[in-house]
Structure formats: C-alpha cells, structure tokens
C-alpha cells in the first residue's frame, strides 16, 4: 500500500515529472491534460511554473519550453473538441432526451464561449472538460479555434514566464519548489473555491 501511495505521489510531483521526461515529457503531459478525459488529475499549472523555474536555473531551454507545450495545449483542446463533437452527435441520435441539454449548452457557448474557452485554461480539471463540452454543444468551430489558440498561448506563456521570472529574481528558489507548487495550486483552485463560496452564500 505504501509503495502505491509513493508511486502516486511521484506521478503528480511536478519536479519528478520534469526530470523524468524533460521537454518531451512536459509536452506530452500538457496534451493529455488538455485533450483526454483521464488527464484531468495531471498538474498542468504547477508543472509549467516549475519548468520555468528550472529553465531559469539552466536545466531547460525556455524557448522550447514555451513552443512545444503551447502547441500541445492547442492541439489538446482541439482533440477534446472533436471528441466532444462526435459524442454529442451520438447522444443526439441515440438519446433524444439529451438534445434539450445540448441545445442549452449550445446557447451558453454562443453567448459566453469565447471567455469560457480562455478562462478555463487557468482552472484545473475544468480545462480538461470545457473543450469537449464545447464540441458536444456544437460551438462554432472557427470561434473555438481562435480562442483556443489565444487561451493556450496565454496559459503557457504566463505560467512558464512566471516561473522563469521567479527563478531569475529569487536565488536558489529551486530549493523551495514544493512551497512554490503549493502556492500555485492554491491560486489555481481559488477561482473555483470562490464560486463555490458564492453559491453557498446565496443558498
């Protein structure tokens, strides 16, 4: 049991993932987290911030760190959208009861889809499922692609450059990566916690 727990800790340990896979590993993790449902537990934000810190220490090339994960983030969301689109069409054909829910989702994405696609990038778990829901709701594809690219670039640039800037500004910050990761995770989930608090308060 203890060995299983240790394995799970290593799996979500951002620094261990980076040391294990380098740029290729980071790119693959970003793609899986953004494009495939089972990747929702992967530590995208903390992974990219930590990568930026290690890049500042000379362990990674910041240029490739921005380029390849940004491509993976965009392609990942495209994959999630296409999966959702296919699943949505199947649900409409086989289960007519879902049509009303999907039509409501379509209306929502027509109104707020642009903001949703961009802002969801910065919320763990949510960023994994939003593209698929957008596809199932048949959000206009050209609009989705435009804001997918914008959101993907903003997410990767902001997280990696934040880590890179911290790494340059604070000497030996890599020794305190666990603290940095904890802060990043807290900041990542704070919007969701705030929304939950507002719902509880209104209820």
Image: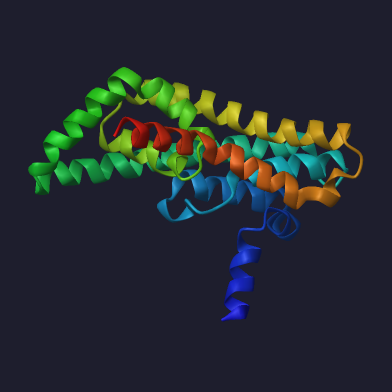
Of residues 187 and 123, the one drawn nearer to the viewer in this rendering: 187
Residue that lies at the very extreme toward the right in this rendered image = 171
| Residue shown at the point (46%, 45%) measured from the top left | 125
| Residue shown at the point (34%, 45%) measured from the top left | 83
Q: Position of residue 39 (x, y in %)?
A: 48, 53
Q: Where is residue 5 in the image (x, y as percent from the top left)?
A: 59, 73
Residue that lies at the very extreme toward the left in this rendered image = 96
| Residue shown at the point (53%, 34%) measured from the top left | 122
| Residue shown at the point (19%, 41%) measured from the top left | 89
Quadrant location of the C terminus in the rendered image: top left
Residue 118 vertical placement versus 17 (above, below): above
Quadrant location of the N terminus in the rendered image: bottom right
Residue that lies at the very extreme toward the top in this rendered image = 111
**Which quadrant of the structure image shows residue 73?**
top right
- Coloration of the structure image: rainbow
Of residues 192 and 45, the one drawn nearer to the viewer in this rendering: 192
**Which quadrant of the structure image shows residue 35?**
top left
122 sits left or right of 86 in the view = right
Q: Where is residue 124 in the image (x, y as percent from the top left)?
A: 51, 43
Residue 154 vertical placement versus 11 (above, below): above
Residue that lies at the very extreme toward the bottom in this rendered image = 1
Residue 166 vertical placement versus 32 (above, below): above
């Amino acid at each position: 049991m203890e060995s299983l727990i240790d394995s799970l800790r290593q799996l979500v340990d951002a620094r261990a993932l980076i040391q294990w896979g380098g740029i290729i590993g980071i790119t693959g993790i970003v793609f899986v987290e953004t494009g495939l449902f089972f990747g929702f537990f992967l530590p995208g934000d903390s992974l990219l911030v930590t990568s930026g810190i290690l890049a500042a220490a000379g362990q990674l090339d910041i240029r490739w760190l921005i380029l390849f994960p940004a491509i993976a983030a965009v392609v990942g969301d495209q994959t999630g959208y296409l999966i959702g689109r296919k699943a949505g069409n199947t649900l409409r054909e086989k289960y007519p009861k879902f049509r009303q829910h999907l039509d409501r989702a379509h209306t929502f994405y027509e109104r707020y889809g642009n903001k949703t696609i961009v802002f969801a990038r910065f919320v763990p778990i949510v960023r994994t499922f939003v593209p698929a829901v957008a596809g199932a709701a048949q959000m206009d594809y050209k609009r989705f692609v435009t804001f997918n690219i914008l959101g993907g670039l903003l997410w990767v640039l902001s997280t990696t450059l934040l880590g890179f800037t911290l790494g340059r500004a604070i000497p030996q910050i890599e020794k305190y990566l666990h603290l940095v990761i904890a802060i990043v995770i807290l900041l990542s989930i704070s919007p969701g916690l705030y929304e939950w608090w507002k719902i509880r308060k209104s209820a």
